[in-house]
Amino acid sequence: MVAAGQDRRLGRRRAQCALAAATVLLLATGQPGRADSPAPTPESKRAALFSEVFGDIQGYYIDPLPLPMLAEAGLDALGGSGDVFRVEYNDHIVAFRHHGDLLGQAARPADDDTDGWGTIMAAGAAEAKTVTPGLGDSDEDDIDETMISAMLKHFDRFSRYSGPQPAQAQRDNRDGFGGVGIGIDQTDPLPRVTDVFPGSPAADAGLRVDDHLVAVDGKLLQGLPRDAIIDLLRGPIASTVNVAVRRDTAAIPLTFQLTRALIVPPTVHRHLVERGIVSFKISEFNAETSTSLDSALLESKRNIPGGLRGIILDLRGNPGGLLAKGGGVDAASLFLDRGDIVSTRGRNPGSIQHFVADNHDVTEGIPLAILVNGGSASAAEVLTAALQDQGRAVVIGSASYGKGTVQEVNDLRNGAELTLTWARLYPPDGYLLHGHGVIPQFCTSGTAQGVEAVVAQGLHPRDPLQELPRASLDDRQWARLREHCPPVMGDNARDLEVATRILLDPKLYRSALRPPSTTIARRPGD
């Protein structure tokens, strides 16, 4: 995800504010017609929504797709079985039929007319609701989702539609929410605190892991579903909430008054490995990941007895997340004084971007290893490829997932999100990340070899293909590389052992580093 989506959403909000201001002005000056305007109908709302959806697809999806084809797919999804509802097209007319009988028709819009096809979608849905069994009683959001999901079958598998409620949960995970800063589970009759986020209102007030929540603002929690409990705990930033907890060491429940704050779910978890080596497990990339990693690195440098000798970034199972704005690019920049990180290229001019390190290496060159597996994807692969190509880190594990595309997240007027693939990713070496992924130098998958054998194989690969520039490989050669180190899921204990072995031996570490990239992924015109 990239900043362009945020800029466009701001533009939409400004446009909506301007429309609201214009409405107020018209009412104040006594111009007729506006004060008595009827409330929007489901059909007018749907027409506006699909006009917006079609506009986003035209503007941002990485490959051009014809609107008539998408409209047909969306409306066909409302037909039920047999010939209950069917849409027919010719050069001039769009007709809606029920068992062959004409229900209604409309002039066919131009192929690029987003408003016109939005109106067609609304008209078709209205007709389908009159004849398709059960559709008339369906929730309007569900009907929208049915049509949009059917359209998205023509897209790549990373493009998706999220209805209003799932979309809000996704925004909360990326950008944060008003809350108290705890994790809970419901394995016990009362919800149990499983995590207290450092620096959160809950931590400042003294809540502890294994406390059991009894009530929130006087409402008893036993028997409530987890989502309902979370809704009680969350609320506007700076608002207060009273939480009663049962603690094993207290005879009676304890009550805490907490002031909600912006909570961004923590994604960086630190573990001391041995002899001055620290591992940072990064679960995903959100708006606070790079800041949290920066703080954890500096704290480790200050507080590790004898000094910090090596760093392990554990990205196994990390599905990605935010590319920039605190995500993978910014995290990679923490380890580089200068140099390329990644380029993005797509059909929209705004998707053509080039990211370079704009920071300084906060670790001052401390030896660095990165662990990846078949679940490491997207922003996790961007960070790994950048530091591998720049000769800053050794990479250990299995081939990564190979998700080398960027998704643009579009906020829709109904509170939903339309996520569209809009760019492909190119690491510093200039190869296409998508479908290829990152190949570790020290491979632990598909082998029962011990640590020393894995290290020797990584330093002296038997296949010369492994030493060729990545940008020079064709798809057949890439497939062979991935066969040498097949992607696996799960955490292989040998990954950590190999990383520790290399980081504790400065001479071995220097031998293991690749020379910095000389093939740079520049955007066209650079």
Image (cartoon, rainbow, N blue to C red):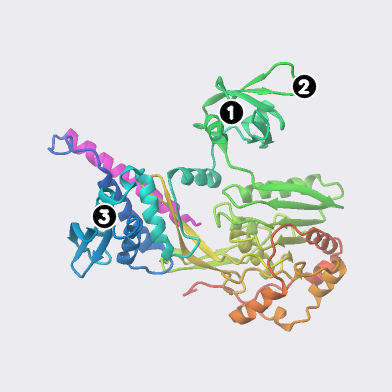
Q: Residue at x 64, y 31 (%)?
A: 191
Q: The disc labelled 2 sits on which kind of residue?
A: Thr
Indicate whether residue 18 is drawn in magenta: yes
Going from the N terminus, do you reach mark 2 or mark 3 first?
3
Q: The disc labelled 3 sits on which kind of residue?
A: Gly
Q: Is residue 15 left or right of residue 290?
A: left
Task: Tell me if residue 358 comes above or below residue 426 in the rendering.
Answer: above
Q: Position of residue 448 (x, y in %)?
A: 82, 68
**Secondary structure under the numbered disc 1 in the rendered image:** loop
**Secondary structure under the numbered disc 3 in the rendered image:** helix
> Contact, CB < 8 Å: mark 3 with mark 1?
no
Residue behind mark 3: 124
Structural distance between the alpha carbons of marks 3 and 1: 43 Å
Q: Residues within 10 Å of mark 2 (few under 14, many from 20)?
A: few
Q: For residue 328, what is the image quadrant? A: bottom right
Q: Position of residue 53 (x, y in %)?
A: 35, 56
Going from the N terminus, do you reach mark 3 or mark 1 first?
3
Indicate whether residue 165 is drawn in magenta: no
Q: The disc labelled 1 sits on which kind of residue?
A: Gly
Residue behind mark 2: 249
- What are the residue bounds of the magenta stretch? 1-28
Going from the N terminus, do you reach mark 1 or mark 2 first?
1
Q: Which mark is on residue 223?
A: 1
Structural distance between the alpha carbons of marks 2 and 3: 63 Å
Looking at the picture, tell me which residue is in the foreground, 37 or 215: 215
Q: Is residue 507 left or right of residue 328?
A: right
